[in-house]
Image: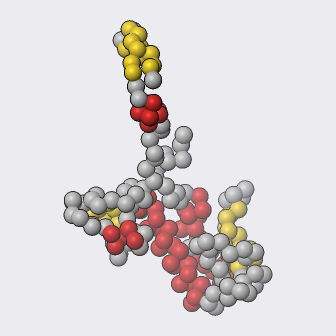
């Protein structure tokens, strides 16, 4: 394929393989922060601290990658560590305050914490659907108590938590 290029104000005709041209014109794929790597990645240590592991060691990070604890973006690792800790705290709290509703009978008998964007407030509502990662409570009182105890962390989760790297959503 022939294309006309202008370089320093001068036009030239260049012969380019069509597949190379198409490849060159494609937008580079954005990094998600979750790519698999054999060197240089972030992980969440057992105390919740985000650490960096590096080096060209074959197989490094395989265990972390398999359990979802390997990140190529530090902010993604930090945000996920914070969000994961909150979810563990909420599940533990629900278990200690009445347990979890049965999967088969949760509808109309379970409560969840939601966020009302119009008012910027947390709300306790009946659970009409079971969402991935959703923490359900047996009683409205238990859900309200959890919302009160974890208020600031929940507000952060609903308003600021982003599981993708900074700028990923931008065009």
Residue 114 visible (yes or no): yes
Nearer to me, 23 or 30: 23
Question: Is 57 placed left or right of 2 in the picture?
Answer: left
Q: Residue at x 54, y 47 (%)?
A: 169
Q: Residue at x 37, y 60 (%)?
A: 36
| Screen quadrant of the N terminus | top left
Question: Is 157 placed left or right of 112 in the picture?
Answer: left
Residue 44 visible (yes or no): no
29 relative to 131, above or below? above
Question: Is 89 placed left or right of 108 in the picture?
Answer: left
The residue sitting at the top extreme is 10
Q: How many marks?
A: 0
| Screen quadrant of the C terminus | top right
Q: Residue at x 49, y 48 (%)?
A: 168
The residue sitting at the right extreme is 108
Percent from the top left, x then y, of residue 2?
A: 44, 19
């Amino acid at each position: 394929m022939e294309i006309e290029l202008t370089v320093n104000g001068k036009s030239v005709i260049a012969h380019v393989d069509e597949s190379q041209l198409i490849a060159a014109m494609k937008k580079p794929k954005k990094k998600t922060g979750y790519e698999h790597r054999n060197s240089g990645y972030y992980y969440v240590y057992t105390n919740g601290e985000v650490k960096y592991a590096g080096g060209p060691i074959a197989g490094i990070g395989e265990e972390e990658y398999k359990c979802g604890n390997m990140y190529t973006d530090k902010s993604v690792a930090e945000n996920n560590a914070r969000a994961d800790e909150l979810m563990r705290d909420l599940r533990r709290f629900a278990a200690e305050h009445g347990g979890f509703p049965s999967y088969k009978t949760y509808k109309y008998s379970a409560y969840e914490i939601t966020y009302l964007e119009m008012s910027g407030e947390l709300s306790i509502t009946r659970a009409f659907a079971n969402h991935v990662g959703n923490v359900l409570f047996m009683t409205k009182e238990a859900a309200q108590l959890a919302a009160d105890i974890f208020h600031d962390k929940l507000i952060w989760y609903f308003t600021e938590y982003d599981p993708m790297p900074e700028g990923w959503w931008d065009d």
